[in-house]
Structures are given as C-alpha cells and as structure tokens.
Image: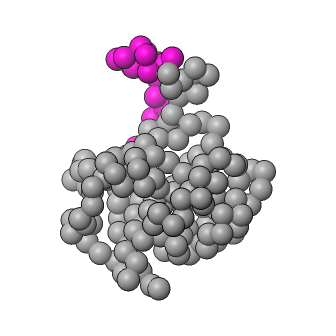
Amino acid sequence: MSFKEINVNELEMNPFTKISKQWMLITAGNEEKANTMTASWGSVGFIWNKNALTMYIRPQRYTKEFVDANDTFTVSFLPEQYREALNLCGKISGREEDKITKAGLTLAYEDGTPYFEEAELVFVCKKMYVQEMKEECLEDASFDATYYPNKDYHYLYIAEITKALKKQ
C-alpha cells in the first residue's frame, strides 16, 4: 500500500484518543541510522500560524539524540494490530538492540525523514521550539512526585506539521 499526502486541515480524528490511547511512534534520523520511541503524551493544534504538534521526550531517551540532531522527524500512528510493536518500542532502547527490526516494522522515508510503512497516518514535522521542563514551573507539586521522582524532566518540542501522509 502507498501513502497519499493529504491536507492536515481535512483530517477527521480525535487527537485525545489518537495520542493517548492509540499512541504514536516518534522517529528521527536518516537513511543511515534512525531510532524510534513510543509516546502517549502530546497534542496537535495551531501556533505561530502553523499547524503544530507538541511532544515530550525525557533526556535519557535515545530517540532524543536523533530528534535533536535533525531538523525534521515523523510521528506515525499505527493500527491496533501493531500494539505489541508499540509496546516493544516503548520498553527497549535502540542503544542496546535493533528494536525496529525486533518489532517487525519497516522504515520508509519522506524527504529523507524516516517513518513506518505499517502506519495508517504519518505527520512529517519540522522543529520550531525546544525547552526543558523545569520543576519550579510545575503549578501542581504532586506532578513532581508522581511523574518526576528522578528529576528527569521532559523536553517539550513544538513542531510544524509540514505534511500529513495517509495510507491508501
């Protein structure tokens, strides 16, 4: 099956279930080396006159190195039949093994940016803003104890969605 570029404004999806329940694979790199991670925190919206995606990556995640080293990355949404692959990509590090192959996923490239052939929807994104979250900015102190007992605060990324690709 092939992908067709669609206008992001024509998407009919619930971002709350798409991200938090279906999950997404954040993928960055190039044709020589790429890495991916599963994420369930993020949002889509509009900022700076751009269609945008916001995502969060902890500093120790290997994928963060790839996202930081490249101007673009992708977010792939896979159908439910790939839940095991999504689980695996969220549990093991690409530093230690080839988790993409182990998960049975196939890399494809859009303008040199990796995504997955198994996806049903892909956002190609261009970074616009990156900032480390800080303890002193948390308005609810319980978040620190609940989500950051190791003080490994996420980095917040805001990226323009430059293309939306839908499986045909």
Please state the horizontal and vertical placement of residue 120, each as a whole percent of the image: 42, 71
Q: Is 1 located above or below residue 156 in the figure?
A: below
Which quadrant would the C terminus be assigned to in this image?
bottom left
Q: Is 49 located above or below residue 33 in the figure?
A: above
| Residue displayed at 27% across by 61% down | 13
- Asked whether the viewer can see residue 158, the reply is no
Q: Nearer the viewer, residue 83 or 119?
A: 83
Residue 155 relative to residue 11: left or right: right
Q: Nearer the viewer, residue 150 or 84?
A: 84
Please state the horizontal and vertical placement of residue 1, each as a whole percent of the image: 47, 85
Q: Tell me the quarter of the picture where residue 33 sits.
A: bottom right
Residue 130 is inside the magenta segment: yes
Q: Nearer the viewer, residue 45 or 168?
A: 168
- Asked whether the viewer can see residue 3, the reply is yes
Residue 27 is inside the magenta segment: no
Magenta-colored span: 126-145
| Residue displayed at 21% across by 69% down | 10
